[in-house]
Amino acid sequence: MPALDKFTEYIDTHAESFIKRLSEAVAIKSISSDARRREDVIAMGNWLDGELKKLDVETKLVDLGTQVMQGQTLQLPPAILGRLGSDPKKKTVLIYGHYDVQPALLSDGWNSDPFTLTVDEATGRLYGRGSTDDKGPILGWLNVIEAHRSLKLDLPVNLRFCFEGMEENGSEGLDELIQSEVAKGQDGWFNGVDCVCISDNYWLNTRQPALTYGLRGITYFSINITGPGQDLHSGAFGRTVHEPMTDLVKLMSKLVDHDGKILIPGVDEMVPPPDEEELKLYTAIDYSIADIEHAAGGKIAISSNKEAVLMGRMRYPSLSIHGIEGAFSEVGAKTVIPAKVGGKFSIRLVPPQTPENVNPLVISYLEAEFAKLNSKNKLQVEYIHGGKPWVTNPKHWNFEAAKKAIQTVFNVTPDYTREGGSIPVTLTFAESLGVNVLLLPMGRADDGAHSTNEKLDRSNFIEGSKLLGLYLHEVAAI
Amino acid sequence: MPALDKFTEYIDTHAESFIKRLSEAVAIKSISSDARRREDVIAMGNWLDGELKKLDVETKLVDLGTQVMQGQTLQLPPAILGRLGSDPKKKTVLIYGHYDVQPALLSDGWNSDPFTLTVDEATGRLYGRGSTDDKGPILGWLNVIEAHRSLKLDLPVNLRFCFEGMEENGSEGLDELIQSEVAKGQDGWFNGVDCVCISDNYWLNTRQPALTYGLRGITYFSINITGPGQDLHSGAFGRTVHEPMTDLVKLMSKLVDHDGKILIPGVDEMVPPPDEEELKLYTAIDYSIADIEHAAGGKIAISSNKEAVLMGRMRYPSLSIHGIEGAFSEVGAKTVIPAKVGGKFSIRLVPPQTPENVNPLVISYLEAEFAKLNSKNKLQVEYIHGGKPWVTNPKHWNFEAAKKAIQTVFNVTPDYTREGGSIPVTLTFAESLGVNVLLLPMGRADDGAHSTNEKLDRSNFIEGSKLLGLYLHEVAAI
């Protein structure tokens, strides 16, 4: 049996132990945006470091310092740098992933505890926070290394790792670490890296593997409005004071239209329209309105035109309103006038947009609109975090290697996509290392990353692990 | 020493034990609008029944049946009917109070655990959920009875009690109970009642006791918008689907202006403007813009005109937006598109407004505004609960008795106020018993009922207990 067949057979026969390892990872509540869970994020970093060491990966936990968050000074979770192999005759592939996750509460509407990996035998789905974003893909790489070690197969490339625990909260400290390692040259952990591979996004549909050559950036804000010294009774104070919620919903209503048009002057206008050739790219993609509506779970597509929906995700900015901190949010009927409210929204950015050129438009617009309200309350537009968008060349050999691996594992040609989400570190790697960065998704469009009932299909985890391994062999063969 | 001096002395010398009893009551989390706390509400009813029995009050716990709330069938907390004295030569006073409270979480911004009565020795304030709304006033009556019993003083009137545990959630079942007791005539618990006294509101300021002869009604809604099958990632889905939050903030922005004007056509217009004589009433009240801003804790009065602010509270409707259920409400920066959101707001009603004549205006307006959005999401306007407004004659002997008691205890003449809040049972008593109903507030304007750091001043609790006792003696003397 050829070596690569042994490899894929090993992945198949060890699937249950791989799923068990994933369930250990999911059980650690590594929510980076919640100060109360910071110790869990650090615990997750230590767990991952231990797993890497078991596979003889040389690692270093990098102390990224502290941050002030929610009024507390918090230790940042460590970045994990890793090294496996230093053969000058091999290419060197740098792998990135993040071990932190989005918040999740059973009461948000999960069908099972978000931090207990729950296997649905009928559908083969593995439910749990972080299953697809991004613990599953990280563990995919561990599966590849374990298989090679156990089979005594030589890894075809040198590997470098960079895993972080703050991706869901602005990747605090990571850019500085990467730039500092690059600056060290031959003494840095990223010395000799030929290409980067990141598995932290999704197929465009539920059928077809994809390679991704673009990402939207993001800029995240809270519109903070204060006035009363404490929450007030709406009977005693209704129609006697300026209410922060009244002001906030008026401002939030001026951000975006139901058809997705961003109402902040100058933001949509920064993006040039597509030319004929670009339009053809979207027509070629295996995608339908039914795909978006299946993934969204409702007949709510913003257009009946497939290309318009694809461009809405890939090449236009978007603005979403996430919620309000400080207002009444529980079940029931509380008759409160909230004293201090923060309306959270974010804009997904595309070239040439950056937080630097978009934020001033956002802030001046909101301040001007607030002034029109003639309210005695106070407005503070708080910028929470952001990152630039990224687009690369999908014809690079890094992408060609991944395409061949997909053809081997899945027997199809991948969709070439630009992704609506944001992974700011992609741009940092591309700019500071000057090498090609490949986004190689493991999960499907309907995985529900960031939402309730996040899942990773068993087949995506297992076939995806094979894909990651074969991709390394194709990189070596090019 | 005359009997009444002994009574007031007893109240003074037993203040600490009265505060201890209040702390026991505050410790029971009797939140009626939260299904998870329903057992605590029932426990609170049982505690109160036990305290009444200790004072030889004859009681009956009335089973009000069940309700469906938050998807569950829940037992309603019992109404407590009580009787003390049946002397045909005495007047009979019916006392109403509620033993349930509003929701409260330390994380809402409380300085101390909301369910631990916390005494600030420097200011004499007693902090805790329910301290002023409405456990303190209920216990005031117990203090009066205890003093009379201990001093072997004859109560000057017959007392009847009606205490409920659902006031903060629509007084479910209470109207039917009252009407059924009234229909029983001589066999009912309210037979022979000459007047009603309710202590469940507040002075207009922090200096001057008040008597209240009017209340606003209320109608409470949730604007429910659904679309996606589950929460979505704003990167993957932003600008590809109609987002419920986008629709919701647009609808909520069309409810009320920053100056308090209700934008739902026909609602404000139902209320006739004041004539010259009515305007003089507001001019006479001991009140200033500084009072409202002190109570609100911020310089946010809706007008610099005292009469306009008073009328905004007393004789005009108001609309407040309370918050959103289902959206992101935690600290941090979650990039979610919430799948199902419910925007909560309520309108305080004044004559001739009722839920019956206002609700159709609300529903048809929101449906029409939603239709303009051309959204594929679904709208459901959910009416949660409501009650009619009430106004009575402040020259009645019931008010005269309370006025004299205030003059004795506080050496001032009370403000005559209409209250912005809603106690729907007031109207039920007035209409079904056909007797005068007096609102005799115990707490101050800045007590923070329904808000964070709710408190009752020690002096209001103690002097207020004296006032309740002397009021009964004045009723007997008229």
Image (tube, coloured by chain):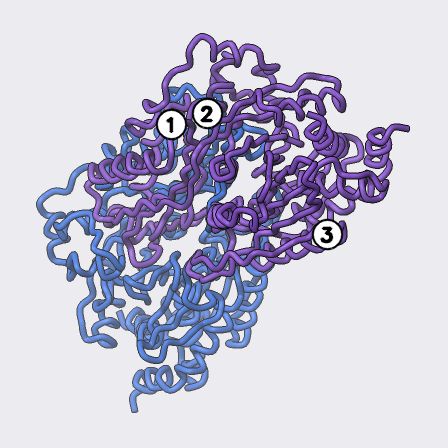
Chain colours: A purple, B blue
List the residue tagged with mark 1. Answer: A352
Which image quadrant for residue B473? Answer: bottom left
The image position of residue B138, as x and y in percent, is 43, 67
The image position of residue B362, as x and y in percent, is 36, 31
Residue at x-position 39% and y-position 49%: A335
| Element marked by disc 2 | loop
List the residue tagged with mark 3. Answer: A51
Residue A330 appears in the rendering: no
Image height of B472 relative to A99, above or below: below
- Looking at the rendered structure, the kind of residue marked 3 is Glu
Image height of B229 relative to B8, above or below: above
Which label sits on residue B239? Answer: 2
Q: Are marks 3 and 1 on the same chain?
A: yes
| Element marked by disc 1 | loop
Position of B225 with respect to B450 (left or right) is right
User: B296 or A105: nearer the eye?
Assistant: A105
Residue B307 appears in the rendering: yes
Quarter that holds the N terminus of chain A: top right
